Image: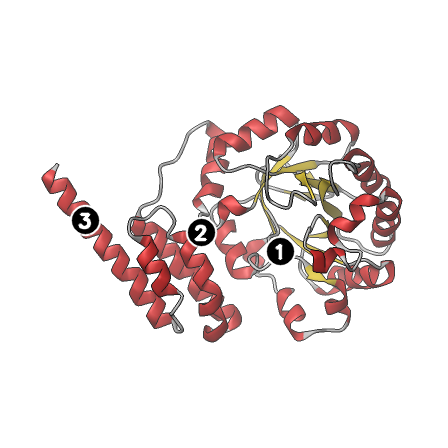
Amino acid sequence: MLKIGDIEMKNQVVLAPMAGVCNSAFRLTVKEFGAGLVCAEMISDKGIILKNEKTMNMLYIDEREKPLSLQIFGGEKETLVQAAKFVDENTNADIIDINMGCPVPKITKCDAGAKWLLDPNKIYEMVSAVTAVVKKPVTVKMRMGWDEDHIYAVKNAQAVERAGGKAVSLHGRTRVQMYEGKANWDIIREVKQSIGIPLIGNGDVTTPQDAKRMLEETGCDGVMIGRAALGNPWMIYSTVKYLESGELMGEPTVREKIDVCILHLDRLIALKGEYVAVREMRKHAAWYLKGIRGNAKVRNAINECNTRADLFTLLTALVVEEEEKEAMESQVG
């Protein structure tokens, strides 16, 4: 099983820390589908230090989500260390993760996220400064490099290990690639062979079979699933089951999809209030509807929803409509 420091997971399946998505409502829903570890969306070190209200709310963790990894980002040693100490002493997170993979310009301009990938010495300096002052295990999520000419994944991962980091998550793309092109699993295998701490592989895991293949081909200790879990926590459940028994699970019914979507909505309302939650839920609802017949028309209507009642009515009407179609088709068949 996957073990990070003294934190032991039930399995090797990890939910990636996706910005704007991985709040407590989403994480808890995915955890209930069997994820061994869930990761919170990245949080600014300066936001933590300044006690920004929105940032403080992002630190909320439901005990049912645990074990949980809380991710921070920053480009300056002093503020990163202060933020890590705050997370260590004032949250119920199990693991502190440092982001050095985010490719977006507003993050890299601050010498944070993927900008770290250009300097293994900075990685060692920053990670060792954090591990020296916290009790929780410290991990790093990174990409394989800045661009094709600057791939220092092996040196960077070794720097994390030397600095006292307890695990590395490696996305097999460069910063320049963003989320395009194919993830390089060879570099994941190369890094795994070069370090003694656990390595979690990330990139192009869209089916349970992909997860098994990544574990077998790279030797990594865990597999991280990101975009494939959006609106589809069944992907997590199916992957856990497939890795355990080799059995592939069936697809969820429309009713099952909508029931979980509404549960997710209600958790988001409890977390953020109806006004914010319904607007945020629009993108999630569109993800849940993927693969359902006639979803384009409903998706357009969802973008006009402003209340829970509006969204609930639309979603439940879709279930009734789909079940009526299925009943008619079975009679004809």
Q: Quadrant of residue 188?
A: top right
Residue 34 visible, this orientation: no
Q: Amino acid at mark 1?
A: Ala
| Category of crowding for the residue at label 2, using alpha-carbon neighbours closer than 10 angstroms: few (below 14), some (14–19), many (at least 20) | many
Q: Amino acid at mark 3?
A: Lys
Give the x, y percent position of residue 29: 48, 54
Residue occupying image coordinates x 15% and y 40%: 330
Element at badge 2? Answer: loop
> Measured along the vertical axis of the image, is residue 211 above or below residue 327?
above
Q: Quadrant of the N terminus?
A: top right
Label number found at residue 325: 3
Q: CA distance from mark 1 to mark 3?
A: 39 Å
Label number found at residue 231: 2
Label number found at residue 40: 1
Q: Quadrant of residue 299?
A: bottom left
Label number found at residue 310: none
- Counting every numbered tag in the picture gives 3
Q: CA distance from mark 3 to mark 2?
A: 23 Å
| Category of crowding for the residue at label 1, using alpha-carbon neighbours closer than 10 angstroms: few (below 14), some (14–19), many (at least 20) | many
Q: Amino acid at mark 2?
A: Gly
Mark 1 or 3, closer to the camera: 3
Which circle's residue, 2 or 1, is located before the other in the chain? 1
Q: Quadrant of the C terminus?
A: top left
Depth order, front residue of 53/101? 101
Residue occupying image coordinates x 50% and y 44%: 228
Which circle's residue, 1 or 3, is located before the other in the chain? 1
Residues at marks 1 and 3 touching, judged by CB atoms closer than 8 Å: no
Depth order, front residue of 159/246? 159
Give the x, y percent position of residue 185: 64, 30
Residue occupying image coordinates x 39% and y 55%: 260
Which circle's residue, 3 or 2, is located before the other in the chain? 2
- In the shown orientation, is residue 10 left or right of residue 164? left
